[in-house]
Image: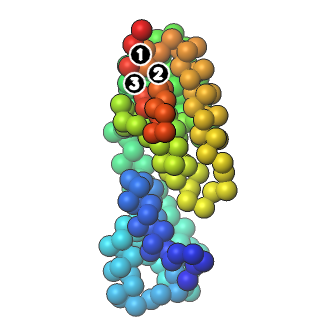
Amino acid sequence: MMPRMDGIQVLQKIRAGGSSVPVLLLTAKAEVDDKVLGLDSGANDYLTNPFATKELLARIRAMTRASAAAVQPDAKLHFGNVTLDCATFELSSPYHSFVLANKEFQMLELMMRNPRQILSAEQFMDKIWGYEANMESNVVWTYISYLRKKLVVLKADVEIRARRNAGYSLEEYTK
């Protein structure tokens, strides 16, 4: 019932992209088959209209409790001599630290969870800015530039490498 694609298709794309963001479907579709399809497609919860605001808020609190508990084991990511604290957005090395802006954090988190893997500008755009974002892909290059400068100041033994017509990867620094 949404333009371009329905909620189930959006949810399936989100999950296919590897995102585990909590999803609560709010919908007028109240049939059991619709609920099963929504939950089987990756929704964490399903609530039909009309609904009580108190119930909606309780379901959101329950989902965020569960997702916060799931994040705890990976609260800090390490690669080379840098550490990314997922709770505080702090990027640190033995020499210095920075609190990253939201998009910088999301990009570096994606690279640190996938070290040595080439990630295309399109993958960054889809996972960070979303499928419907009206952004130019050069915004990825801009944020990569910011992160590279910060890694230099940190005296990091890792670097972001560009692969022509392929993307970027986080690699151990080689001289």
Q: Is residue 41 above or below residue 163?
A: below
Other-residue count near label 1 (Cα within 10 Å), few / some / many at <14 / 14–19 / ≥20:
few
The residue at the point 60 percent across, 77 percent down is 3
Q: Is residue 150 above or below residue 128?
A: above
Q: Secondary structure at mark 2?
A: strand
Q: Which residue is mark 3?
A: 171
Residue 119 at what x, y percent from top left?
44, 40
Dot 2 or dot 1: first in sequence order is 2
Indicate the amino acid at tag 1.
Tyr
Q: Is residue 150 visible?
A: yes
Residues at marks 2 and 1 touching, judged by CB atoms closer than 8 Å: yes
- Mark number, residue 159: 2
Q: Secondary structure at mark 3?
A: strand
Other-residue count near label 2 (Cα within 10 Å), few / some / many at <14 / 14–19 / ≥20:
some
**Marks 2 and 1, Cα distance to the nearest angstrom?**
6 Å
Dot 3 or dot 2: first in sequence order is 2
Q: Is residue 162 above or below residue 44?
A: above
Q: Which residue is mark 1?
A: 173
Residues at marks 3 and 2 touching, judged by CB atoms closer than 8 Å: yes
On screen, residue 167 versus residue 100, left or right, reads left
On screen, residue 137 versus residue 37, left or right, reads right
Q: Secondary structure at mark 1?
A: loop
Indicate the amino acid at tag 2.
Glu
Indicate the amino acid at tag 3.
Glu
Dividing the image into 4 quarters, which one contains the N terminus?
bottom right
Residues at marks 3 and 1 touching, judged by CB atoms closer than 8 Å: yes
Q: Is residue 73 above or below residue 49?
A: above
Say which of 153 and 3 sits in front: 3
The residue at the point 38 percent across, 53 percent down is 18
Dividing the image into 4 quarters, which one contains the C terminus?
top left
Other-residue count near label 3 (Cα within 10 Å), few / some / many at <14 / 14–19 / ≥20:
some
